[in-house]
Image (tube, helix red, strand yellow):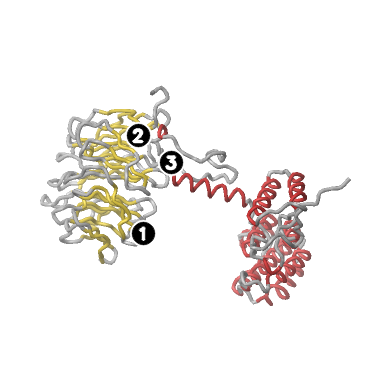
Amino acid sequence: MHQPHQPVANGAPPHHVNGDAPASNGDVQPPGLRMSQTDQEIVRLIGQHLISVGLERSAALLMEESGLHLEHPAAATFRQHVLAGDWVKADHDLRALHDLLRDSPHVDPHNLAEMKFVVLEQKYLEHLEAGRALDALHVLRNELTPLQFDTARVHRLSALMMCADPHELRARAAWAGGAARAGVLARVQAALPPALMMPPARLRALLAQAAAHQAARCRFHAEPRADPRPDHVPFTLLADHHCSPDRFPIHSLQVLNEHCDEVWYCKWSPDGSKLASGSKDNTVMIWDFDPAAKRLTFRKSLEGHSYGVSFVSWSPDGRYLLAAGPEDCPDLWIWNMQTEQLHLKMSHSQEDSLTAVAWHATSDKFVCGGARGQFYHCSLDGALINSWDGVRVNALVCRSDGRTVLAADTHHRVRAYDFTDLTDRNVIQEEHAVMAMTLNAADTLLLLNVANQGVHLWDIRARALVRRFRGLSQGHFTIHACFGGAHHDFVASGSEDNKVYIWHINGEEPIAVISGHTRCVNAVAWNPAHHDALASAADDYSLRLWGPRPPNHS
């Protein structure tokens, strides 16, 4: 009985190794079957995927019926011999591949030497691991060294001859032994045109890219776009992806009325387990969040803030909470959130105005300032490290480099200050006052609440205005916007018209406008860990929790 041939090759002839040639090199399409280059590649992708899930016979039948091969025969045998550790035959296969590639304009000659080096390095290490020191020495002297490629690496390899046992060899070489053969294949494959050897799991990679693209374009996709499992796409492939707004945090879940005056600010802890709210009633309230029940529960009131609390900032490690007051407040409170006790009340002068604070990434230093010209760099014990005179600050954020602080000042600017060498430079110039600002997780985009303008998005690397978000009402009140979603694809802000506005970062018009508050919404906070939870604080004395539509809600 006739047996179908095995799927071994996917190639064009030597003068078409870049993959834009008609089927050839053993690819013979049956009479009457005419496939475009794209169709041929799709068939090969399907064949590769069938093999990866264990359907070898189906793949072989597909290749036989189509007259195609998955890979160039030399590439297929090279793969087989590398994985088997047959280095003599692998070297022969590599020479055949070199002959195919030598005259190709699409292949860097440097890559050919690297391919050879990678294979010989594995061969050398396996000889050492097996105790064949003379064979290893032969490879080192007569094969690796004459390549004259990465001589520093060759010197490090020669030092491995002194390893006492395989365990020491693997540790010093940072090498996985025979298990590294797949890595060798991957490194060689990266230098080969895909017409000769397809990248592994290529169909999965294409589907994952398509899924990520659809998720990025989805108006309501707040969850991570990529799944760590390569065999799993987080939504069906059988239809275009669209998240339902029912799963988006625009539905009122809870109204919290424990504050007895205007609520000026709210902020989630870095792990999303707690919410802190600051109020004109002189308290900071701490709330526990249950992500399963989507409920906030009152935990503790931090009291003694005699001027009210207009801003709070969690340290990046979640251990401390800084609380600042309005313009006439000269004090800062640092709360230890593990003991829930006051760590320090800081005041340098009763003439100070300390309304803006921001933590460095190390959680042991912070900056603070205000509109009266104070701008301090402080340690956790309140000691003044250094200061900048005459800088009238409305808002502060620390960049991830551990040294740069962005400060919005009363001249409508955002300037970068380096407290290590006391240098500064202009980053952004607005036409109106910057009332509040926040930085995205990637440290590339800056979100500004601008008086009489609303919310502006800036690319701080290009120093370019990316977008003006439309819809909200903002005069001279301080309103705090935020980024949201797993990839900070969303922007949310309060508004003087008592509503919460949400935009996708790629569009100027809001994707949602949610009502519920009866007075100005001063701040919104998107949970950094549970992306379907949003909190808002308003002048109506309330906090609100927004989340997915409850199951029993019509």
| Point 62% across, 59% down: residue | 171
Sequence-first disc among 3 and 2: 3
Q: Residues within 10 Å of mark 2 (few under 14, many from 20)?
A: many
Seen in the image, is 114 located left or right of residue 355?
right
Residue 292 location in percent, x, y?
A: 43, 30
Q: Is residue 98 above or below residue 455?
A: below
Nearer the observer, 474 or 372: 474
Residue 220 location in percent, x, y?
A: 41, 40
- Closer to the observer: label 3 or label 1? 3
Residue behind mark 1: 401
| Point 75% across, 46% down: residue | 56
Which quadrant: the N terminus? top right
Q: Is residue 474 above or below residue 8?
A: above
The answer for how far apart the CA atoms under marks 2 and 1 are is 34 Å
Q: Residues within 10 Å of mark 1 (few under 14, many from 20)?
A: few
The secondary structure type at the circle numbered 2 is loop
Seen in the image, is 323 located left or right of residue 42?
left
The secondary structure type at the circle numbered 1 is loop
Q: Residues within 10 Å of mark 3 (few under 14, many from 20)?
A: many
Label 2 is placed on what type of residue?
Ile
Residue behind mark 3: 221
- Closer to the observer: label 2 or label 1? 2
